[in-house]
Image (spheres, grey):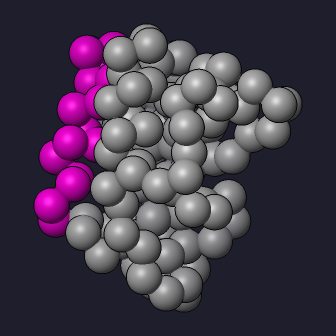
Amino acid sequence: MDLASIDLTDIEKIEHTGTTGGKDGDFKYFLTDAECSELIGLLHQVKLGSEADESKALSSGAVSDYTLYFTDGDTVTLRPGQFFKIEDTYYDFENYDELWDEFVKVGSAHQK
């Protein structure tokens, strides 16, 4: 999937799910229109490298998934992190250090 080709007008809604890694840390909500726009803008900046070994990419603790619901009925689930997961495949996230703080900010107002 070419993240840079995702057009905001093709998105019906974006669901953010995950866990903070702590007790009762699970969360699930839909992004606001402004947050959707911010996330799509971030996705356009992501530079993915080659596929990564899943055993190397698995992490413990906090997990954050974004499910994009497209207007044509398709969905895709993304998991940004040290490695970037698209559906069932992990990739090297080449500009992780540059973008990670911005991913953390998207939707953070919903989490307490």
Q: Is residue 90 magenta?
A: no
Q: Report the front residue among 63 and 16.
A: 16
Q: Is residue 6 above or below residue 45?
A: above
Q: Is residue 92 visible?
A: yes
Pick the quarter of the image with the C terminus: top left
Q: Is residue 102 above or below residue 82?
A: above
Residue 15 in view: no
| Quadrant in which the N terminus appears | bottom right
Residue ID at (21%, 54%): 99
Residue 28 rendering spot, x and y as whole percentages: 53, 22
Q: Quadrant of residue 73?
A: top right
**111 relative position to 44: left or right:** left
Q: Residue at x 83, y 31 (%)?
A: 72
Q: Please say if 67 is above or below 111.
A: below
- Write down the quadrant of residue 102 in the picture: top left
The number of discs equals 0
> Does 99 lie within the magenta span?
yes
Q: Residue furthest right?
A: 73
Where in the figure is residue 41, as x and y percent of width and height?
35, 40
Q: Position of residue 88 (x, y in %)?
A: 69, 65
Q: Main secondary structure of the magenta part?
A: helix
Which residue shows up at 38% across the image and 35% down it? 39
Residue extent of the magenta highlight: 97-112
- Of residue 52 and residue 47, the one placed in the foreground of this image is 47
x and y percent of residue 103 in the render? 29, 43
